[in-house]
Image (tube, rainbow, N blue to C red):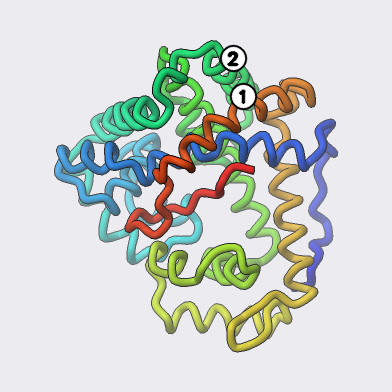
Amino acid sequence: MSGSVEGAWQEPSVLDPGLVRRTWRSAEALHGLIYFAPEAHQRYAALGIDPRSGYFASRAAAMGSVGSGAVAGAFFNFNPELVSRALPAVWERATPAAVLAARLDAADAALRRVLGDAVDSEEMREAAGLARTAAESVGERPEGRALFAAHAALPWPDRPHLVLWHAQTVLREFRGDGHAAALLVAGLTGLEALVLHVASGEVPRRFLQRSRGWSDEQWDEAAGRLRGRGLIEGDEPALTDAGRSQRTWIEAATDRLAAPAYEVLGAERCTRFVELAQPMSRAVVESGSLNVAAASPRDVPKPT
């Protein structure tokens, strides 16, 4: 596979792709908090669910009592054997509705702990309104976006900080489903996408490999395939020019596919949302609540 993908076409967005990405990233820590927060682990434990199973169950619960095959496909880059250790057995201990309730309660507690009085601020209400407008604007575009469609169908919370959290969750899954589509068009498996990501130098191999459940042998085989395609090179793999081009195309395609969610806001309101959300996300990061070295299988980018 070369660094470009022919035939992948989409109507250009009226928004700058960089602004689309900044708008998403500005609130991503608010969503990602749920994968690391002790409040979430405590509430899952009360249901008899361990943290790793809690991750798979809480993110998949919007789809119902789904099995491991569907979740491995939707989540894209986890070893199916890892997923099968959690699902469907977890549904014998708790219903999807109970898991979703625990997740929302944990988000409430974690955000209140980290943000304090800001959860009741005018800035929070404004940010929540903008995020909800964006999330609802693509509610009629579920095609090929199973995780997004499932989360978009959930009822909206009534408190502004939870509206913002839920909206960002919906928007994150909208973007994530588009990202998976871009990876498929680029001809990458989930594991190959991880290896390519590590080769970019943006995230350590140990974290992604361990949290996604891949063995050294599986990882090295995937790296060998990418070397054969001229995308990585070296014993400690680094991107080749073709690999960098591939990564650039994938990220640009992901931005294009995510853009419809933000077009309803336009550039001015997207910029305003970034101004509102960044201080909140910064508070999450500075609290130490995003511990990517922890056992939770989720990496969350720091807000820019």
Residue marked by disc 2: 126
Task: State the SS at label 2.
Answer: helix
Q: Nearer the viewer, residue 151 or 239?
A: 239
Q: Nearer the viewer, mark 2 or mark 1?
A: 1
Locate the C terminus and report the quarter of the image it occupies: top right
As drawn, is 147 to the left or to the right of 187?
A: left
Q: Is residue 260 above or below residue 32?
A: above
Name above or below for residue 224 compared with residue 146: below
Q: Residue 126 appears at what percent x and percent y?
A: 59, 14
Q: Earlier in the sequence, mark 2 or mark 1?
A: 2
Q: Position of residue 83 (x, y in %)?
A: 34, 58
Among the 4 quarters of the image, the one containing residue 47: top left
Task: State the residue at coordinates (71%, 53%).
Answer: 251
| Res 208 visible | yes
Classify 90 as above or below 114. below
Q: Are marks 2 and 1 in contact (CB under 8 Å)?
A: yes
The residue where tag 1 is placed is: 276
Q: Residues within 10 Å of mark 1 (few under 14, many from 20)?
A: some
Rendered image quadrant of residue 134: top right
As drawn, the label of residue 74 is: none
Q: Which residue is at a point 60% across and 32% down the rendered structure image?
A: 278
Residue at disc 1, secondary structure: helix
Q: Which quadrant of the figure contains the N terminus? A: bottom right
Closest to the observer, 286 or 290: 286
Q: What percent of the width, then of the height, locates residue 199?
A: 62, 72
Residue 191, percent from left and from top:
52, 68
**Toward the viewer: 279 or 194?**
279
